[in-house]
Image (cartoon, rainbow, N blue to C red):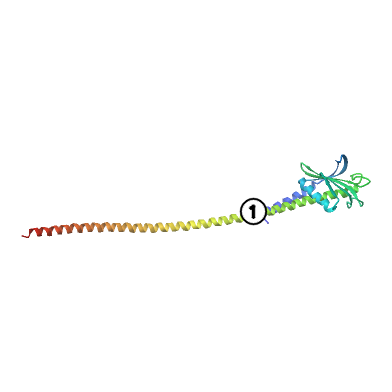
Amino acid sequence: MTQRLLFFLFACLVSFGALAQRSPVDETDNTIDGIPRKGQRVSIQLDNRRVEAAWLKYLNDKYPGKVKNVKGVIKLDGVVVEDVSPTPVRVITKVDGIPTGTTVWWSIDLGNAYLGREATPVQWKAAEKYLKDFARGMYREDVVAQISEAEKALVQSQNNHAAIIAKVEVIKKDVDKNKARKLEIQQQLAQNAAELLQYNNLIDANLKEQESARADIVNMRVSLESVKDRMNKIE
């Protein structure tokens, strides 16, 4: 694992810690079916579609067959929320996107009262833990995804590095071939120069032979003329 990846993973963990601290749960009203309802809301600095899908899965896994989602308003009737109420309660919840991420809001009808910070402090703390744990789980999942992406990026970088090394090795081989070809050409040029010198020497020798042959021809003509002249003088 490279120093860069280690730094990235450390940054992810620091980011996770900072994000987890920015998941406050506050008390807020939300109007559902025209009725203002008191409830809890947690802010999560992640994409709202992703958070909504995870929240629905969480509720369906915990309360199978109880979740009814109508245009983004999720209702659960007759469910037991451990540590909040030992008896079945009614839950209404909603996920909304905000500029900084997402809010998950829920209202719990305890039967004799709605969940409230002052009216039901014990139940409030227990329900608050559910939302905080869910937010922390989302952040952990996000960090795991970032680590996975970092590992993929590392593998890609290593592959690219290996490809670059392989490429330079090919270039080195081409350079060696070029040097060998250059030496071969130089040897051929030297051989060609030697052959040219030999041909020039042969030409010079041939010119000398031609000169000697011309001299022989002149001498033969002179001898022939002398013989003819003697022949003419015979009576």
Residue 154 position, x and y percent, is 67, 54
174 with respect to 127 (left or right): left
Q: Is residue 38 above or below residue 194?
A: above
Q: Name the residue under label 1.
A: 157
Identity, as a three-letter code, of the amino acid under mark 1: Ser
**Mark 1: secondary structure:** helix
The residue located at (51%, 56%) in the rendering is 174
Occupied quadrant, residue 43: top right
Q: In this view, does 99 lie above or below 202?
A: above
The residue located at (34%, 57%) in the rendering is 197
Residue 228 position, x and y percent, is 12, 58
Residue 125 position, x and y percent, is 88, 48
The one nearer the camera, 153 or 22, is 153
Which residue extends farthest left? Answer: 235
How packed mark 1 is, by other alpha carbons closer than 10 Å (few <14, some 14-19, many 20 or more), is few
1 with respect to 231 (left or right): right
Residue 70 position, x and y percent, is 83, 45
The residue located at (83%, 53%) in the rendering is 61
The residue located at (22%, 57%) in the rendering is 214
Residue 135 shows in this picture: no
Which residue extends farthest top? Answer: 34
Q: In which quarter of the image is the C terminus?
A: bottom left
Residue 61 shows in this picture: yes
Which residue extends farthest right? Answer: 112
The one nearer the camera, 232 or 5, is 232
Tell how many labels. Answer: 1
Q: Quadrant of the N terminus?
A: bottom right
